[in-house]
Amino acid sequence: MASTHRIAVIPGDGIGQEVCPPAREVLDAVGARHDVTFSYREFDWSCARYQREGAMMPEDGLDQLRPFDAIFLGAVGAPGVPDHISLWGLLIPIRRGFRQYVNLRPIKVFEGVPSPLRTATAGEVDLVVVRENVEGEYSEVGGRYGRGFPEEMAIQEAVFTRAGITRIADYAFELATRRAGQLTSATKSNGIVHTMPFWDQVVTERAAAYPTVSWNAEHIDALAAKLVLDPARFDVIVASNLFGDILSDLAAALAGSIGMAPAANINPEREFPSMFEPVHGSAPDIAGRGVANPIGAIWTAAMMLEHLGHPAAAAEVTAAIAGVLAKTDIRTPDLGGSATTTEFTTAVLQFLGA
Ligand code: NAI
Ligand code: MG
């Protein structure tokens, strides 16, 4: 059945501008094969806008995004604009305002892309980090006291709610039932004595509802080490906002390059549009040269297809990425090659039969 989706595109800054067009080309190509069309509207919300107009996005930004079926974001961040401004002025208001409480980050080692780890091989490393995305350590509760005086201090409160832990645990257990049936919960209940034991307690309570999933809790420090020593052991990892952020960058690096890692900010109830963005940032060190790796953005587009109800089209896109990596030596410089963003994208389009 023909369908059409309205997509809000926020390319942002730096290589965000360079990886969005490849993602759109791939979406259009695979969509044409599946009778799916996309109507895009681009927004110039970015650090460049902040420098021009004093705000990352307009005051009614969320209202403008609400009618869309999904949001596709490149990356934001620019030298000269403090990172907390770009994050709290755009990404965090969207994630929180649209209750995108799941941040989903799959990691795979592909044939043809050597991992920096001897032990990580294609077909074996295939895991997903489910990061709590709206509460936890990234909270606005706290403040600064005695500015400028010797006793100056800062207090930052972590906020963990029963509702928040329950829904992220349920999402992760549910996902594990559809994958290898194995879940690891990241904790630190030995050192962080209030919030983390609470996290463990609620995850344990939820586990009872998923008898087919085998699960365990591991302290974040040991878990980070095990992810390096034996990445093939993991299937679904559920973690708080901060732990999930750090673990998913670590895991992305294991897979060869952070430029390959996709992510989705999901509102599972579909009350609001979900937002799809590669894990990487705006990469000012390589921006403007046309050499950014588009895999992260293209794989992210596949996650968006899946969310919009087109799993077959999504699978074709990930198979096309895997095909280019396994069957050709076309690589962008972050993977040791000399291909441009456009050359790699063209190869993906060819594999798609576009
Ligand atoms: P980054 O991800 O932009 O870059 C880290 C390193 O990886 C750089 O050497 C970069 O060249 C390389 N890299 C990243 N993506 C690549 C790609 N697609 N192809 C090839 N190489 C790639 O992280 P960094 O340098 O910490 O942050 C730069 C800016 O991006 C900052 O302003 C930061 O706040 C922002 N940022 C934004 C995010 C977002 O919009 N979601 C996420 C992370 C950072
Ligand atoms: Mg991060």
Image (cartoon, helix red, strand yellow):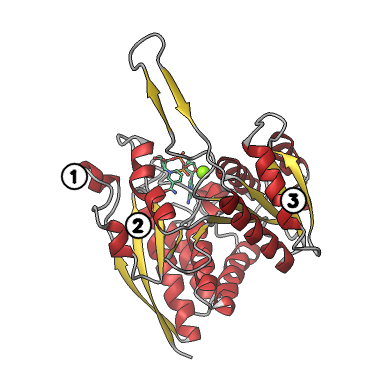
Residue closest to the eye, 243 or 189: 189
Q: Residue at x 34, y 34 (%)?
A: 82
> What residue would you read off at disc 2?
11
Q: Do the residues bearing badges 1 and 3 touch, measured as CB atoms within 8 Å?
A: no
Name the kind of residue labelled 1 in the image: Arg
Q: How far separated are the C-alphas under marks 1 and 3?
A: 49 Å
Q: Nearer the viewer, mark 1 or mark 3?
A: 3
Residue closest to the eye, 270 or 340: 270
Residue closest to the eye, 163 or 6: 163
User: Seen from this angle, which residue lies furthest top?
Assistant: 150
**Under tag 2, what secondary structure?**
strand
In which image quadrant can residue 85 be found?
A: top left
- Mark 1 or 2 closer to N-term? 2
Q: Are there few (<14), some (14-19), or many (20+) residues within 10 Å of tag 1?
A: few
Q: Position of residue 299 (x, y in %)?
A: 53, 63
Residue closest to the eye, 27 or 61: 61
- Mark 2 or 3 closer to N-term? 2
| Image quarter for ligand 1 | top left
Q: Position of residue 260 (x, y in %)?
A: 55, 54
Q: Above or below — where is 118 with respect to 60?
A: above
> What residue would you read off at disc 3?
204
Which mark is on residue 194?
none
Let me know if residue 87 appears in the view: yes
Name the kind of residue labelled 3 in the image: Thr
Let me know if residue 347 appears in the view: no
Q: Say left or right for 211 vs 140.
A: right
Q: How far separated are the C-alphas under marks 1 and 2?
A: 17 Å
Q: Do the residues bearing badges 1 and 2 touch, measured as CB atoms within 8 Å?
A: no
Q: How far separated are the C-alphas under marks 2 and 3?
A: 40 Å
Q: Above or below — where is 295 with respect to 353?
A: above
- Mark 1 or 3 closer to N-term? 1
